[in-house]
Image (spheres, helix red, strand yellow):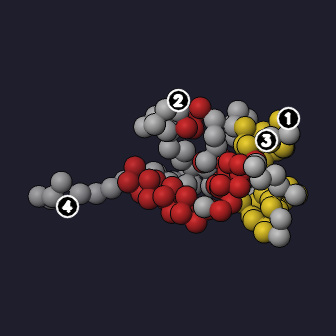
Amino acid sequence: MTTIPDRIQLHKRSKQLELQFGAAVYQLSCEFLRVHSPSAEVKGHGPGQEVLQVGKKDVGIEGLETSGNYAVRIIFDDGHDSGIYSWEYLHHLCRNQASLWADYLQALEQAGAARDPHTQVVNLIEPGKS
């Protein structure tokens, strides 16, 4: 059985998407949704082909469009609009937000990348260490 949200509300000023599944209410940031887009541009076409999304800290959502009775297409203000978020995938993001976010931050750190589009990270290696 697919979990369908009872309510979806976009808060443009705070850049949060609020989802209600039964009595549970979740807040997902636009940045979180953007870096976890289910699109092929982000997920790739198979395991190991994921593309780490960087510099998305300030991204917002311009609009939402339902896709049948099973999903919503999110239109981001950075031009990304190809992710179709099924109700099941959104529920997964809500339930696993903390661990998914921690994994994303770790991947950014390992890649020497940043959330802020105006930041460049340089990793310095001490002499004699590599």
Q: CA distance from mark 3 to mark 1?
A: 7 Å
Quadrant hosting residue 116 = bottom right
- Position in image of residue 52 (x %, y %): 50, 44
Q: Check contact, mark 3 vs mark 2: CB within 8 A.
A: no
Q: Is residue 24 above or below residue 5?
A: below
Q: Which residue is mark 4?
A: 126
Q: Check contact, mark 3 vs mark 1: CB within 8 A.
A: yes
Kind of element beneath mark 1: loop
Quadrant hosting residue 77 = top right
Residue type marked 1: Gly
N-terminal-most mark, 4 or 3 = 3
Q: Which residue is mark 2?
A: 45
Asked whether 110 or 128 is in front, the reply is 110
Residue at the (53%, 63%) spot, across then down: 99
Give the crowd class for mark 2: few <14, some 14-19, many >=20 residues within 10 Å.
few
Q: CA distance from mark 1 to mark 4?
A: 55 Å
Q: Which residue is mark 1?
A: 68
- Position in image of residue 37 (x %, y %): 64, 43
Q: CA distance from mark 2 to mark 4?
A: 38 Å
Give the crowd class for mark 4: few <14, some 14-19, many >=20 residues within 10 Å.
few
Asked whether 11 or 19 is in front, the reply is 19
Residue type marked 2: His
